[in-house]
Image (cartoon, rainbow, N blue to C red):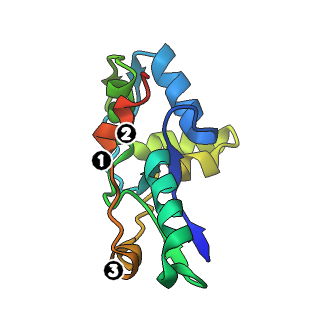
Amino acid sequence: MIIRSPLVYGKNAPANFALLSKLIAKVPALPFGLTNNHRSYIAATNLADFLTVCVSHPKAAGEIFVISDGVAISTKKFTNAISVGLSKKVYQFPVPVLFMSFAAKLVGKAEMAKQLFGNFELDCSKAKQKLNWIPPLTMAQAMKLLKK
């Protein structure tokens, strides 16, 4: 079986989530106030639950699954959720996405800008229909685990 996921978030999650978490922990203001994209994410806890289901479910063998929490949200909402999970107050400045994308391209971070501002919605209905899987935690519940 093959499992494809979007950005994985949760306590001690690596890569871009770790960078965003560190940024939110240190900086009280972010430039995502005008970001209205739609991106899928998955909590590490939800991904682990899905993997457990796949190991024991007979219909999972040989399948390709695209998995997420099932709700696509903007980078602004995602960073707000992280700030709540970390008990940090954050202000979202209304910086135009076009400006931030251009600035990122100038400093060689075009790919990072695409990940922050672009759309990336995944349809995980196959996992729900074939394996009867529903993510056990909402994003708000998963973000509460950041403090523990």
Instruction: Please tell me which residue is depicted at 40% across the width and 22% down the height of the picture.
Output: 86
Q: Report, in whole angstroms, how far the alpha carbon at label 3 lies from the one at label 2.
A: 23 Å
Q: Residues within 10 Å of mark 2 (few under 14, many from 20)?
A: many
Give whichever of 142, 89 is nearer the camera: 142
Please state if 15 lies on the left or on the right of 40 as rendered: right
Label 1 CA crowd tier, 10 Å (few <14, some 14–19, many 20+): some
Q: Are marks 1 and 2 in contact (CB under 8 Å)?
A: yes
Residue visible at 39% across and 71% down in the picture: 124
Q: Is residue 95 above or below residue 6?
A: above
Residue 13 percent coordinates (x, y): 57, 38
Per the image, label 2 sits on a secondary structure element best described as: helix
Q: Residue furthest right?
A: 108
Q: Is residue 34 visible?
A: no
Q: CA distance from mark 1 to mark 3?
A: 19 Å
Which residue is denoted by mark 2 in the rendering?
A: 142
- Tag 2: residue type? Ala
| Residue 10 x %, y % | 48, 38
Viewer-closest of 10 and 50: 50
Q: Amino acid at mark 3?
A: Gln
Rendered position, 55 above or below 47: below
User: For the image shown, how many numbered marks are present on the structure?
Assistant: 3
Residue at the disc numbered 3: 129
Q: Quadrant of the N terminus?
A: bottom right
- The amino acid at mark 1 is Thr
The residue under label 1 is 138
